[in-house]
C-alpha cells in the first residue's frame, strides 16, 4: 500500500479495526471477490455497502473509513472519488481500490481525494484477507479513527 502523505510503503502496526466501514460500489460491478473478503473481515467491524448514486445521501459521521470500489469497468472512479471527498470533507480516510497499478493512475487517484490507492488483484482469498486487514488498520490509524 502506498500512502499519499508519505509516498512510501509502510509497515502495519498492530491495532484494532474501525467500527464501521462504508464501501461505495456500483451495482453489478463484478467485484464479488472484494465484497466476499470484506464480509469475512466483518467480524472486526460493521460493513455497509452503498451504490455510487447515493453519495449525497450518506451521513459520513457514521463511518470510520470509506472504501471506493474502482475495480468496475466503464465508471469514472476519479470523479466519484472527488465527490466522496467533497461530501466527507477531510474527516475520513478514503481508500480507492482499483486494478491499474500505473503511477499515472495512482497520482490521479490522489489528485481526486484518495488518501490511499490499493491495486486489487485476483489472488487467493487468504492473501486478500490479510492484505485488506492491513490496509484497514493503516488507513484508520493515520486518521485516529481506531475503535476500542
Image (cartoon, grey):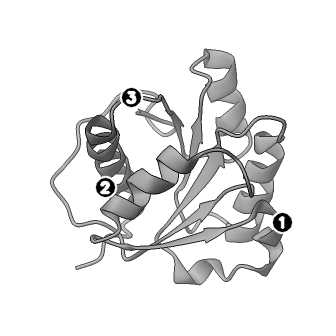
Would you say the residues marked 2 and 3 are in contact, meaning their CB atoms lie under 8 Å apart?
no
Disc 2 on helix, strand or loop? helix
Which callout, 1 or 2, points at the residue further toward the start of the chain? Answer: 1
Which callout, 2 or 3, points at the residue further toward the start of the chain? Answer: 3
Label 2 belongs to which residue?
137
Distance from disc 3 to disc 1, alpha carbons, whole Å, reads 29 Å
Distance from disc 1 to disc 2, alpha carbons, whole Å, reads 27 Å
In this view of the protein, which residue sits in the foreground, 137 or 126?
126
User: What's the residue at 75%, 69% (across, down)?
Assistant: 87
User: What's the residue at 36%, 47% (across, down)?
Assistant: 132
Given the current orientation, which residue lies at the most extreme left position?
Answer: 14
In this view of the protein, which residue sits in the foreground, 30 or 58?
30
Q: Which mark is residue 3?
A: none
Which quadrant of the structure image shows residue 76? top right
Residue 44 as seen in the image, left or right of residue 89: left
Q: Nearer the viewer, mark 1 or mark 2?
A: 1
Q: Which quadrant of the rendered structure holds the N terminus?
A: top left
Q: Nearer the viewer, mark 2 or mark 3?
A: 3
Label 3 belongs to which residue?
123
Label 1 belongs to which residue?
53
Distance from disc 2 to disc 3, alpha carbons, whole Å, reads 20 Å
Within 10 Å of disc 3 (Cα), the crowding (few <14, some 14-19, many 20+) is few
Residue 108 image position (x, y, % from top left) = 72, 30
Which callout, 3 or 1, points at the residue further toward the start of the chain? Answer: 1
Residue 48 image position (x, y, % from top left) = 54, 73
Residue 143 image position (x, y, % from top left) = 42, 61
Q: Nearer the viewer, mark 3 or mark 1?
A: 3
Residue 91 image position (x, y, % from top left) = 56, 69
Rendered position, 50 above or below 125: below
Amino acid at each position: 500500500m502506498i500512502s499519499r502523505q508519505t509516498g512510501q510503503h509502510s509497515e502495519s502496526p498492530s491495532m484494532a479495526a474501525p467500527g464501521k466501514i462504508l464501501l461505495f460500489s456500483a451495482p453489478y460491478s463484478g467485484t464479488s471477490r472484494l465484497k466476499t473478503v470484506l464480509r469475512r473481515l466483518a467480524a472486526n467491524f460493521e460493513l455497509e455497502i452503498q451504490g455510487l448514486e447515493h453519495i449525497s445521501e450518506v451521513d459520513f459521521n457514521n463511518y470510520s473509513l470509506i472504501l471506493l470500489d474502482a475495480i468496475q469497468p466503464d465508471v469514472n472512479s476519479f470523479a466519484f472519488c472527488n465527490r466522496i471527498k467533497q461530501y466527507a470533507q477531510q474527516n475520513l480516510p478514503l481508500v480507492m481500490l482499483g486494478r491499474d497499478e500505473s503511477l499515472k493512475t495512482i497520482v490521479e487517484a490522489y489528485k481526486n481525494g484518495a488518501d490511499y490507492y490499493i491495486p486489487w488483484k485476483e489472488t487467493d482469498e487468504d492473501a486478500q484477507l490479510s492484505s485488506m486487514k492491513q490496509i484497514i488498520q493503516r488507513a484508520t490509524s493515520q486518521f485516529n479513527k481506531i475503535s476500542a
